[in-house]
Image (tube, helix red, strand yellow):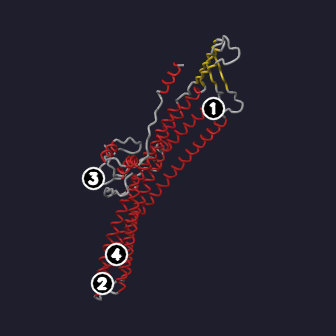
Amino acid sequence: MSKLLLFLILMLSGCATYHPMPLDKTAVDRALTPPALEMVALQASQSHHPLLRPVNFDLRDGLSPDEAAILAVIVNPQLRALRDQKGLAQAQLLQAGILPNPQFSYSLDIPMAGATQGTVKGYGLGLSWDIVSLLTRSAKMAAARKQAAAVDLDVAWQEWQIAQAARLQVYRLALLDRQLTVARDEEKGLEDNAATVKRALDLGYVTIINLSAAQASLQKVHLQVQTIEQQGEQERLALNRTLGLPPEQQVPLAAHLDPPSPQTLPSLQDISRNLEERRLDLLALKMGYQSQEERLRAAILAQVPKINIGFAHASDTTHVITTGFAVTIDLPIFDRNQGRIAMEKATRQRLFDEYVSRLFTARADVARLLADMAALSRQIKTTEQSIPTLSNLVQTYHHALLEGNADVISYYNARDELIARQLELLKLKRNLADQRIALEIAAGEYLGDGTNKAVP
């Protein structure tokens, strides 16, 4: 008995021990504190992400789209939670390789009454083990290994999505800032103009119609300024959230951020070629499918009836000692694992159809986005060409108005049209940035933007 107790103590000494992890304010605040910029810069220069290139992180010249992307991947709390799935997948891989424990049994028979003269205490020792687990171990480990690889790819895909969202928000915020600058400049000019018209009205040089037109134009631009300010604040808060920064933190942006011209993009054929080998979500799905194949194989192997083999050593109360061998086999009359096999087959078919559907959608998205970007480029070109013409028209109306050869309403209508066209141009560029980022996501690769500070 003492040897048995010693054996049990030795077995338990290798067990894990519990360590509490309190969910309190101190722990949460520590987790939410962004890392130091020096640490961010080091991690940004050593990035090993399959799609995000290392960058020289330096905010002294403002945050570029590529810097925002890598910063989001490093700091965003949502991604930290997603990465924990990797640990779970590795734990499942560990569990898949663990064989079931052998079973040890011990019994003691003590004569208590009756013809007990000459009898002794009887005992029994038994050791048995389920050998069928050896048949399915290889398939289960292969399934867990493929699943772990699928989780790694899926996490990388989610990181890519967050990184692209950060890049897009930087573009949007930069273009909104430029819209705001244009609108405020026009607002300042119209304020000065309205004041001048007011003085002219007091002196009797113009009519009340002139002042009303000037004030109406000013009010229209003032509302545009307020709208753009609201949009800019919303975009700034969205960027901070994506970057994992506090809402009140102000992040300076790099200057002269324009989405690159679609003329530099590869063709539809080039982007569509080997798309399934670049899209991390498709690669993750393929790994998941291969993992499911192994699960199905394990389920089919598990049809083999459960077999336990054991050895027994016993002594009865008459001191007769026996040693024997035992085999226990399940009779597969009712349960032949058919339910598990059917579920694994259905899951495999679902994964196959999901892969085909997502690949089809990705190819269709690439074609649609390239067509949309081409149309946007034409609109941008047309708008850019119209602005000088409208500017000349405003100047012409202004000179004609001063000479009394034009009506004031036509002048302010032309001026309103000019500012609207300038703001529309920046909005079109913002839409082009949206389409560019969406295309990179659909294509599963980084297409470059000319503003990155990549590590050589």
Cα distance, mark 4 to mark 1? 80 Å
- Residue tagged 2: 403
Which badge, 1 or 2, comes first in the chain's sequence? 1
Q: Amino acid at mark 3?
A: Arg
Residue type beneath disc 2: Glu
Sequence order check, earlier mark of 2 and 3:
3
Please state which of residues 400 and 9 is positioned toward the viewer in this rendering: 9
Residue placed under numbered mark 3 in the picture: 60
- Give the number of the disc on residue 394: 4
Out of 349 and 377, give the one closest to the viewer: 349
Marks 4 and 2, Cα distance to the nearest angstrom?
Answer: 14 Å
Q: Residue 375: which disc?
A: none
Kind of element beneath mark 4 = helix
Q: Which of the two marks, 2 or 3, is nearer to us in this view?
A: 3
Q: Residue 450: horizontal and vertical position, in percent? A: 34, 52
- Local secondary structure at mark 3: helix
Q: Residue furthest bottom?
A: 204
Q: Which tag is nearer the camera, tag 4 or tag 1?
A: 1
Left or right for 379, reference 123: left
Q: Closer to the camera, 285 or 268?
A: 285
